[in-house]
Amino acid sequence: MIRYALECTDCEEGFEGWFASSEGFAAQKDKGLITCPACSGTSVRKQIMAPSVRPSEKAGASDPEKVFGKLAAKARQHISENYDYVGDGFAEEARSMYYGERDNRPIWGETTGDEREALKEEGVPATPLPPAFAPKKQPDKSKLN
Ligand SMILES: [Zn+2]
């Protein structure tokens, strides 16, 4: 079944019809079986659907890049509000929390490839952060005064 948006050429009423196929539509139309619900005229045609030139809000929302962008912005905000930035001390911090030397807290920071490997081998949980999810680095507070 296919759905066509139709319009009456007499009164310009727009309506919809379901047809088995495009041939089915043509056959019914030729026999005058498709009638306008407003004026019962049989002079109907398929509506021409113009593509929208300007993307609507809705179309934008389903654009994967925009969805990802919003998600990334949320992630960045969440991380910057709830996570401590520990810079390149990440591996050390993660390790001391894992071994109970420090209280657990959410942190984010940088590691070298070697540090990541070492953490993995020790079983220290650490999740790579997609670059788009990383907040802007917090200013170094020691340099502020
Ligand atoms: Zn009509």
Image: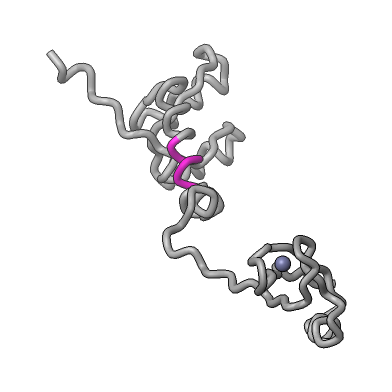
For the magenta stretch, what is the residue range?
Answer: 68-73
Quadrant assignment for ligand 1:
bottom right
Position of the N terminus, as image quadrant, is bottom right
Looking at the image, residue 41 sits to the left or right of residue 20; the answer is left
Which residue sits at x=54%, y=38%?
127
Looking at the image, residue 49 sits to the left or right of residue 37; the answer is left
Give the quarter of the image for residue 80: top left
Q: Position of residue 67 (x, y in %)?
A: 51, 47
Position of the C terminus, as image quadrant, is top left
Residue found farthest to the left: 145
Q: Main secondary structure of the magenta part?
A: helix
Q: How many marks?
A: 0
Residue 104: in magenta span: no
Q: Is residue 46 above or below residue 31?
A: above
Q: How is the image coloured?
A: one colour
For the residue pair 121 and 55, the one nearer the viewer reads as: 55
Q: Is residue 116 above or below residue 39?
A: above
Q: Position of residue 106 (x, y in %)?
A: 50, 22
Q: Position of residue 30 (x, y in %)?
A: 81, 87
For the residue pair 85 and 78, the one nearer the viewer reads as: 78
Give the quarter of the image for residue 89: top left
Which residue sits at x=37%, y=34%?
135
Which residue sits at x=37%, y=25%?
86
Which residue sits at x=67%, y=72%?
10
Give the quarter of the image for residue 21: bottom right
For the residue pair 34 and 60, the one nearer the viewer reads as: 34
Q: Is residue 23 above or below residue 101?
A: below
For the residue pair 88 and 26, the one nearer the viewer reads as: 26
